[in-house]
Amino acid sequence: MKNPDAIVIGAGVVGAACALELSRAGMKVLVLDRGSIASGTTGSGEGNILVSDKEVGPELDLALRSRNKWFEIADEIGNEFELEPKGGIVVAKSNQGLSSLKILVEAQKHAGVIADEVDREELHDLEPYLSHEFESGILYSQDAQCQPMMAAAQMLKWAKNRGAHLEVGAKVISIESDSQGVSSVFTEKETYYSRIVINAAGTWAGEIAALAGSKLPISPRKGFILVTHPAPNVVRHKVYDADYVANVASGEADLQSSAVVEGTRSGTILIGASRERVGFDSSLNISVLRILAAQAIEIFPVLAQIPLLRAYHGFRPYAPDHVPVIGEDARLKGLWHCAGHEGAGIGLAPASADIIAAQILGNSTFMDATPFSPRRFELVK
Amino acid sequence: MNSVIPPEKRVTFTFDGKTMTAISGQTLAAALLRNGIRTLRKTRKESKPRGLFCGIGICFDCLVVINGQLNQRACIVEVRDGLIVETQDGVGSS
Amino acid sequence: MSAALAAADAGAQVLLLESNLRLGGQYWRHLPENGLNSWAGQSALQSDYQKGFLLRNRVSSNPNIEVLCGAQIWSATSEDSVTVNFLYDGVSHSFETQSLVLATGAYDRALPFPGWDIPGVMTPGAAQALLKGSHVLAGKKIVVAGTGPFLLPVANGLVQAGGEVVGHFEAQRLRSWISHSRIAVRNFHKVFQGMRYLRLIRQERGFAVVSAHAGVDGQLEFVRVAKIDSDFRIKNGSERKIYCDVAAVGWGFTPDLSIAHSLGLNFIEGQDGYPVVAVDALQRTSDPRIFAAGEITGIGGSDLSLTEGAIAGRAAADRLQNINPTVTLKSLSRARTLRLRQRKFANTLVKIYSVKDGWRSWLTPETIICRCEEVTAETLKESLVSLGATNSRSVKLLTRVGMGACQGRICSRAAVEIIAAEQKMKATVEDHISAGNRPIFSPITLGQLAQEPIAYDAL
């Protein structure tokens, strides 16, 4: 496919979602990845689709729409990627911890989030193994989970059935343009011609932008995940601790200061820090793993007896303001960015692709996408 | 091979409530085999029976519950007096 | 043990971490406690066990060697110093060192085949462990099969202990030996030892167990044995049923490279295509602080391991004392000559008993490849065909092969070969290495992980 209607660089969950949207709209899409499907951040993802951990603002709106889109996609292409509306619970030890959270929750509810306060009894009904030190919590029933690599693979498979093409092991070495904008993409083996190039290269989005002669400030933030031996039904939702909420009054609630614990379909329990506040930057840092383990045990004491199966790390791509980048490049016409989703890439992929596709096709976007635009980096010099 | 065990070497344990004897120093997997137990658990997805496979603690097929502790590899645990052994459901549910 | 003794003799203080409850490793896993009389004697192995027994005693009684048995190493990293984290007595410990000898050995290589997951099918090592360690016969009617010199002592031991071996099958034919006759002659004493086993028990050559079948109770009822050609493909019409309750099937050995991998050591391709740790004449790895000996540097058996261990131990001790490596080399010249000869023979054995690709033709789509996660051959292949997986890593991510409790120790070697073959490629050392990436080596509970480790102050 030398002359596709659109080229998507990156076969992770974001690239796959873009390929799906554009294929559905009738475009001939070529997806390129220097590795294989989900060989980047998607391959280290937990599969989180959350609204609970988003502050009120454009990202929450994106997350709400995206969450629903995931279920629409599952209906459309079949749920072969373990999508389930598992629900998330933020737990608090004291009523004080909870009350400082409540302001945030009210604002979230206002924005369309479904959040219900649960008392001690309900909390321990929902999570029987939860430490008894937790007295109350907020249940976010919209939080969901999927298997991210499968999701990417299935979306790409569907897109291929609609005429999309996937080239793996195809490393992009240059992106050429002319007076009209982007014109072609060179890999080590081939040249492809298109006026529409979507940069969905996640952690490497900055490099792709550079290859096109542009700039995108995306950096990797290392995160670790612990995976336990299977212990089915011990942890039933995504659970995290609210007691470290800082500075809620100013609206800058930080929900992600402790370990996040969740069970999976296969029975393993995943422990990570969803927004990387334990940002150490070396390889297999045992002290990080130790902290995660200790925090998880605080929440679920029974975890102390469960053996660790493996630990792995991933790189979450983030922009300096921690907001995803979705939109046309500030300088180069035809170069579209859809990257920098940090730890929320899987959750946000469908709605991000929705926006990009709408913008490319000249349709109206479901929300004002200006906050995500790459142009925002140009304003601050 | 399966002769009477002299009392000083005899170990008594229970498996799913049934009392069994073994020779001290034997692994739990060997003791169970000696008592006719070949199937140790059922798999998580397909509920297929599994027993001893590698015998040296690396395949994790011989998982049993010992004194309430899940995921114990029967082939590397030595049998002791009074052990309470139970079949593990799948790969362990608390 | 050999390395520890050599290092202690050369003036070093040694900490020996053994994961099993007793010294001896896999080979001398079941040394008798008091002398050699406490179990059904096997004259063929008597002198060999005597060797192990004496070695163990020498190690235990050496004041410069501290032995920790039951020490489960769960992580090892190398930065400014080599740090090893291990569980001992249920408590997390760590120690740092500037001189490490790795001798993590090998384990039975299992090949997937239809029915290999049925209770009653096991490795020869498992049957051996039951017999030698626990005095238990694995079953009433036992089939021993696969390939490799190890089948002989296993079958032999079972027969001598009063067990009924209803079938004993070696995949290689005699002609494999004929093409290596020169080496065989030079190492006649070893060959002779092997031949002595055959006096007691017949072995049918050129045959393999190609499938196992369960009875109504879900346990092993019979296996199908077939005549195979030199490529391990089944000769049509040659299959026959053998009723048995145990099938001990093994195909040589796979080196345990988890720790070596975690320490960032370099690997090279071994004689059988599988990676081994790259070492020089002094058993030094790509990290000057780390030495490796035994099966992880190439499958070679106990004698070679003893020789390499002695070289590694001496070299590690000399390095600590800043002795010039050339001096060490010189003083070890006899050991090195011995190693060369033993290595040559070991390599020849690996070649003679090599596993040919035809084993894959025995698989059916439903054959379980990954036992822990119950991933079938069909699922693996599907991920390549319709889900766009292109290599072992993406197959792993999409199918969960190798992601279960054993972290690929049992299945990944075979899975990597199946995946490569599907893509009409040969499995590379890199494929095997990345499939063997296990930063956590043994199950440590989160509670143990959460503990601040006790810094182990040896000696």
Image (tube, rainbow, N blue to C red):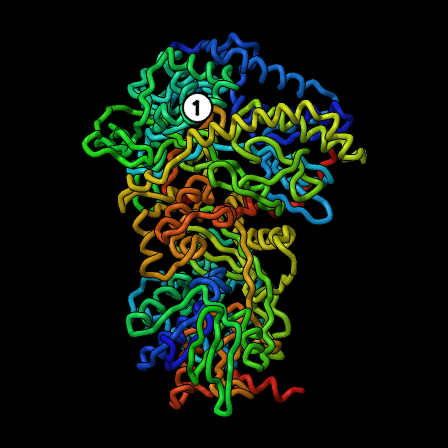
Residue A305 position in % (x across, y down):
52, 43
On the image, the x and y values in percent for residue C89 come to 61, 33
Q: In this view, does A209 lie above or below C242?
A: below
Residue A165 vs residue A117, the one in the foreground? A165
Residue at image position (46%, 78%) is A198
Residue A212 versus residue A134 in the image, above or below: below
Q: Residues within 10 Å of mark 1 (few under 14, many from 20)?
A: some
Q: Is residue A107 visible?
A: no
Q: In which quarter of the image is the N terminus of chain C?
A: top right
Question: Disc 1 marks which amino acid?
Answer: Pro
Q: Residue furthest left?
A: C237
Secondary element type, mark 1: loop
Depth check: B79 or A236 in front? Answer: B79
**Figure quadrant of the C terminus of chain C:** top right
Task: Name which residue lies at 59% across and 15% down.
Answer: C51
Label 1: which residue? C149
Residue A49, placed above or below residue C255: below
Instruction: Please state the horizontal and vertical placement of residue A104, each as a whole percent of the image.
Output: 54, 75
Front position in the image: A321 or A143: A321
Report which quarter residue C223 is drawn in.
top left
Q: Is A263 or C50 nearer to us in this picture?
A: C50
| Parent chain of label 1 | C
Coordinates of residue C126 in the picture (x, y in percent): 42, 27
Res. A159 visible in picture: yes
